[in-house]
Amino acid sequence: MLETPSNDIQRNLSDLRERIAKAAMAAGRQPVEVGLVAVSKTFPEEFVRQAMAAGQLCFGENRVQEAETKIPALRAELKLEWHLIGHLQSNKARRAAELFDVIHSVDSVKLALRLNEACRALGKVLPVLVQVDIGEEETKFGADQGEVRQIVAAASNLPGIRLNGLMTIPPFFDDPELTRPYFARLREIRDQLESESPGCLGNRHLSMGMTNDFEVAIQEGATLVRIGTAIFGARPHA
Ligand SMILES: *Cc1c(COP(=O)(O)O)cnc(C)c1O
């Protein structure tokens, strides 16, 4: 059920921030190096307000259509940062560029071109991450490594977008240890690209880690973790 008293979200957030800080320290990193994107998909605006009251300003949505109503409603009252973390079809690039502050799911040159066009028209520069498909599973979204290189090369000529790092969604495993090689691989790909063309990935973000595996992701260098369930509770099944 969607009725969660506000103190639950506040307590969940403070517990989560503690776990993030602990995982960072254990890995010899500073807690401030790990940003938290609170994934509010499927949850009502009221949950976002409650998280915001607990100091959370950065939120993630996975569908343009859902964001279409949620973001403008909240934008009017709150200054929040919105990240698109789900697959984006080229024909929705324009709307996504208007609604979102960061896009994690750029997985083709075509989409990068569309976003650039939209941002030029809007007079905005949009930070984006390239979503990398590490698993090479055909059903999954994300660019393979050849495509990642093409996107990086293309982006240097696209003033409307600013490449700012990489994102990945590994397959789900009950045992989070099994996700480690995927996270390590994303870090290696980033380091490789950065050594070939220094600066090509801006702030060099690694967006990886969800409720079940964020501690492993932080050990492997995550700078943005995308977490929904641990903050807002279980999502109703689609
Ligand atoms: C839903 C979603 C998340 C959050 O997942 P939780 O397991 O609820 O933390 C993170 N990333 C993406 C891309 C998602 O779609």
Image (cartoon, rainbow, N blue to C red):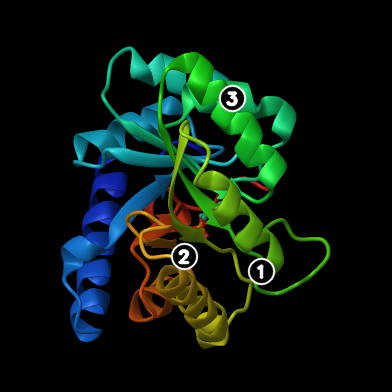
Query: Which residue in the structure is indicated by mark 1?
Result: 145
Q: Earlier in the sequence, mark 1 or mark 2?
A: 1
Q: Are marks 1 and 2 in contact (CB under 8 Å)?
A: no
**Residue bearing the label numbered 3:** 117
Label 3, secondary structure: give it. helix
Q: What residue sits 47% from the left and 37% below the top? A: 161
Residue of label 2? 208
The quarter holding residue 3 reads top left
Task: Name the spot of residue 205 as percent of width and height, x first.
Answer: 38, 60
Residue displayed at 24% across by 75% down: 24
Q: Residue 197's spot in the image, x, y percent?
A: 44, 65
The CA distance from mark 1 to mark 2 is 17 Å
- Give 95 or 150, whichever is nearer the viewer: 150
Q: Would you say 44 lies left or right of 202 here?
A: right
- Front-lying residue, 220 or 148: 148
224 or 230, nearer to the observer: 224
Q: Quadrant of the C terminus?
A: top right
